[in-house]
Image: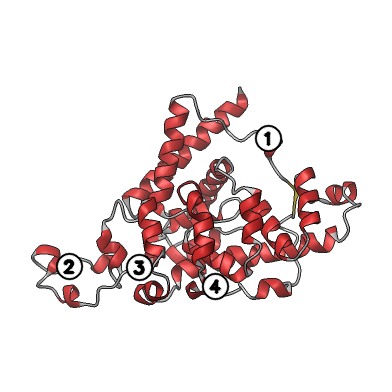
Amino acid sequence: MKVEGVTPEDKAKVDAFMQDAAAVKADETPIPDHVLDALGEFPLKQVFTTLAALGIDLRPEEFQRIVLIKQGAKALAEKLAQVRLVFDASQTGNTPSWAREFERLDIRDANEKIAMLLRPYIPERSCYPEILAARLRRMEKRAELGEYVPLNRNNQWYPMTDEGRRLSSGIPGLVPASIALATGFMVFKRAFPQLIEKSPTPIKTLAAHPWMLPLLIGAGVGATVGMSSMTADRPFVQHGTGTGLDGKKGSTYHQPKTAGVDPVRFGPIALAYIQSGAQQKMTGSILTKHASFSPRTISDASIFQSVRRLARRKGESCLR
């Protein structure tokens, strides 16, 4: 699908933001191995659905460990962690059978036990706009105080290039595992925004998962736009279009009001941040969905500016 009016400048703007976001994102708190191992005990569809529902994206190495643990290949996961090798996301193949189950994520598969395991990491990893904006502000504050230390290159992971595979040739099944993992990761990255944008009505979500909303509200979701946009089962632009307090005399006031997470609140800025760091190009899909790459809310504007400032500061520190 081609969006009319999308210019090379539009694409360049998204690409530049995603490049900056990838640099900033690399310094976020990783999910510890023991939590990833615990997640690997659950069905993958439940794991990835719950992650998406909480707005938590996965790094390639985190995805790799969860899937390998689930497949009973902990020894391979440990060996790759020792040499800090992760699959090359650009080297994909046919979709493995274990990845087909989460090609289409369904919010009804979210799991409360998984959410409780992830609860401590929502403030540091969720990409809901309010949570992300607050996290970036904390990072900027630490930078101003001289407490922000960019990721040490010794802690980085490296794609399994041909040379990497050769050096690690003693690991059984490395090559097919790398291709399968890369393909599965691509499936996850595609399904993540689809769940956010195509989730069922909020009332159905909360009917099945009454624990979800308190987790997100507790982490700050809804703090800048108020609960009205969190609980209205209608587009945000229709809110309060009547007269009087909250448009009580307008027709929209009498529309059904239900509780849940409004999926339209993930605009192009947050989606670009989520997709940053992936080796495959995501610019086209973001512009296809939104046509414009501009802040829509206070949180969006805060995210955009914070990412630019943090990336610039990180770039300057690398030149010293």
**Residue located at (61% from left, 22% from top):** 320
Which residue in the protein does label 2 denote?
241
Kindly identify which residue carries mark 3: 260
- Count the marks: how many? 4
Closer to the camera: disc 3 or disc 1? 3
Measure the alpha-carbon separation of dots 4 and 1. Answer: 34 Å
| Chain-order first, disc 3 or disc 2 | 2
| Labels 1 and 2 touching (C-beta < 8 A) | no
* Residue type (three-letter) at the residue carrying disc 4: Leu
The type of residue carrying mark 1 is Arg
Please tell me which residue lies in front, 209 or 305.
Answer: 209
Q: CA distance from mark 1 to mark 2?
A: 52 Å
Q: Look at 47% across and 64% down and name the residue there.
A: 53
x then y, percent, for residue 207: 38, 75
- State if disc 1 and disc 3 touch (CB < 8 Å): no
Q: Which residue is mark 1?
A: 153
User: Reading the chain from its start, which is encountered first: label 2 or label 4?
Assistant: 4
In 3D space, how far apart are the residues under numbered discs 2 and 4 (Cα atoms)?
34 Å
Q: Is residue 22 left or right of residue 279?
A: left
